[in-house]
Amino acid sequence: METALALAPAPLAQLFNYFGAEYTLYFAFLRTYSMWLWAPAMCGLVLFVFQESEYAGGESVWAAFYCILLVLWASGFLQHWSGLGLGLRVRVRVRVRVRVRVRVRVRARLTLG
């Protein structure tokens, strides 16, 4: 049975048995991300058509509003995926190790003269 967005539910058990846990999480993430992308894509399309018809390519306040909306969308998606991803990791028994090393070196020389 397909959903309204034409994305069938992912067969996680079959993916896990065939590919393993890491790929199962990857496919689950891609499916979730694809479903969540419909909202900003449709809003962007409406904004594009509105701007091209109303303002003939000029700047508008709606573009700034859309950017703020995208930031809120990204925050909501990350919150949703952190909960859903944690549940999936527990379900498929995956330990995720994340190592992030950030090294920033800034050299600046100021000469007045």
Image (cartoon, rainbow, N blue to C red):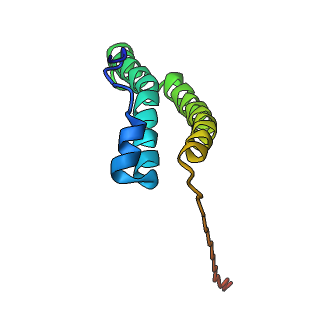
Pinpoint residue 82: horizontal percent, then vertical percent: 62, 41
Q: Which of 26 and 71 is in front in this view?
A: 26
Q: Quadrant of residue 7?
A: top left
For residue 55, side relative to residue 83 (left or right): left
Q: Does residue 109 appear to the left or right of 18 in the view shown?
A: right
For the C terminus, which image quadrant?
bottom right
Asked if 86 appears above or below 103 in the picture, the reply is: above
Is residue 11 visible to the viewer in this orientation of the structure? yes
Residue 55 visible in this rendered orientation of the protein = no
Task: Return the x and y of residue 104 as percentages of the image width and height.
Answer: 63, 76
Q: Which of 22 and 56 is in front in this view?
A: 22
How many numbered markers are drawn? 0
Residue furthest front in the image: 17
Q: Residue 102 at x, y = what percent?
A: 62, 72
Relative vertical location of residue 110 with respect to residue 102 in this rendering, above or below: below
For the point 40% across and 51% down, which residue is it?
23
Q: Nearer the viewer, residue 9 or 51?
A: 9
Residue at 42% x, 46% y is 24
Q: Which residue is drawn at 32% across and 16% down?
A: 1
In the rendered view, would you say 15 is above or below 43?
below
State which quadrant residue 43 falls in: top left
Q: Which residue is drawn at 33% across and 49% down?
A: 18
